[in-house]
Image: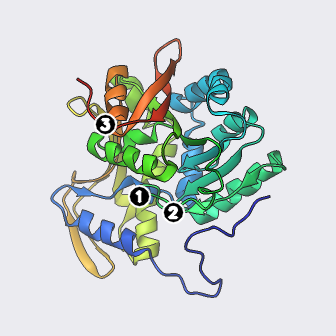
């Protein structure tokens, strides 16, 4: 049932490794800015994907266990809304662990995971197929930030399309970029589609900082792995030991920011281009925006979605929202 035929960008096994030109462009452009920055999507090579899964297990990282409990409590209601034979399209599927909860409530579903890391995608699909032998899985290796052609789109026209975007990944984007992504998802899924999305809420800054700077240092390894990827894939000479992981709360933008801070003045090259950083200068690697419930509704509405259901935990830490494709616009 697990088919790799629709996979995008499959290359011959004998082809030499070629760095992703978009990765190269983003890194070189980002390191040339006054505030150096690399987009967070480049965290997720094979090692980065594995480290992120490890992050979800550390005690301080509340989003995963809270969202998992919400899914366990409310996936039955989702299934009643969309039907047991829906096509579930997961954006940035990762290990698909949370998806298992959803699929148990949709026994006749087809699963279409979209992920930028093909190797990790294959492993996750194989594991999921072992748990759901009858499940039809059609993986798509692609950057979901842009509209994605779904191989099953025409085939699924008679059934419901359910987008799945857990983990508050929407928070990695600025509100403007998040709206663009929501519109792109609507285009990918089509009219009358549903979207099940997890969104983290604003809370005490110290709880947020701890969640992104855990005592075991797993998040630090995740952040530093980006430098290892740059060195490996782009011929970089970055002295990784001279950087440290930093997590900061930005109250004005309502977000956690992750940075890589230079411990001392350093020089290095990437793809033959020279760069210099002073002690204390940082590379901004990730934003994790947090929202109030009203802000979530405005965000979804601007992206072309209307909220149908909104569930949260007893502490109000996290939101699970079911939305339906509607007209894009702004709340009054």
Between 225 and 285, which is closer to the camera in this rendering?
Answer: 285
- Left or right placement of residue 126 versus residue 87 in this view: right
- Distance of mark 1 from mark 2, alpha carbons? 9 Å
Give the residue drawn at x 68%, y 61%: 122
Determine which residue is flagged by label 3: 302
Circle 2 packing at 10 Å, graded few (<14), some (14-19), many (20+), is many
Q: Single out the residue that lies furthest toward the front.
A: 158
The x, y position of residue 271, in whole percent, is 33, 79
The mark tally for this picture is: 3
Residue at position x 64%, y 49% in the image: 95
Q: Earlier in the sequence, mark 3 or mark 2?
A: 2
Q: Quadrant of the C terminus?
A: top left
Q: Which mark is residue 165?
A: none
Q: Position of residue 82 (x, y in %)?
A: 62, 33
Q: Secondary structure at mark 3?
A: helix
Q: Tell me how far mark 3 sits from mark 2, CA to CA.
A: 24 Å
> Viewed as shown, does residue 155 lie left or right of 196?
right
Pointer 1 and pointer 2: residues touching (CB < 8 Å)? yes
Residue 10 visible in the displayed image: yes
Question: Which of 119/329 is in front?
Answer: 329
Front label number (3 vs 1): 3
Q: Which residue is labeled 1 in the image?
A: 146
Q: Which corner quadrant of the image does residue 233 belong to? A: bottom left
> Residue at label 2?
142
The 10 Å Cα crowd at callout 3, few under 14, some 14 to 19, many 20 or more, is many
Q: Considering only vertical position in the picture, is 303 above or below 259?
A: above
Percent of width and height locating residue 121: 63, 59
């Amino acid at each position: 049932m697990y088919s790799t035929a629709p996979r995008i960008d499959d290359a011959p096994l004998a082809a030499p490794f070629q760095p992703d030109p978009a990765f190269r462009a983003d890194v070189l452009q980002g390191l040339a800015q006054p505030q150096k920055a690399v987009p967070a999507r480049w965290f997720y090579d094979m090692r980065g994907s594995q480290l992120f899964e490890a992050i979800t297990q550390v005690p301080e990282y509340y989003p995963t266990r809270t969202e998992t409990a919400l899914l366990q409590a409310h996936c039955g209601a989702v299934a009643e809304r969309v039907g047991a034979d829906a096509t579930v399209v997961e954006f940035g599927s990762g290990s698909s662990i949370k998806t298992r909860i959803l699929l148990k409530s949709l026994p006749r579903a087809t699963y279409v995971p979209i992920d930028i890391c093909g190797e990790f995608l294959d492993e996750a699909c194989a594991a999921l197929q072992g748990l759901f032998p009858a499940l039809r899985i059609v993986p798509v290796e692609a950057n979901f930030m842009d509209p994605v052609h779904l191989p099953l789109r025409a085939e699924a026209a008679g059934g419901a399309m359910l987008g799945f975007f857990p983990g508050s990944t929407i928070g990695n984007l600025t509100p403007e970029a998040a709206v663009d992504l929501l519109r792109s998802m609507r285009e990918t899924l089509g009219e009358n589609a549903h979207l099940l999305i997890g969104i983290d809420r604003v809370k005490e800054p110290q709880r947020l900082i701890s969640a992104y700077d855990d005592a075991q240092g797993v998040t630090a390894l995740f952040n530093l792995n980006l430098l290892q990827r740059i060195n490996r894939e782009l011929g970089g000479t970055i002295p990784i030991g001279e950087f440290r992981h930093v997590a900061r709360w930005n109250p004005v933008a309502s977000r956690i920011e992750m940075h890589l801070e230079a411990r001392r003045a350093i020089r290095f090259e990437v793809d033959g281009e020279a760069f210099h950083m002073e002690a204390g200068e940082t590379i901004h690697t990730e934003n994790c925006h947090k929202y109030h419930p009203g802000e979530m509704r405005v965000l979804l509405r601007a992206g072309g979605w209307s909220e149908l259901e909104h569930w949260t935990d007893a502490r109000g830490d996290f939101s699970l929202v079911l939305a339906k494709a509607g007209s894009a616009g702004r709340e009054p």
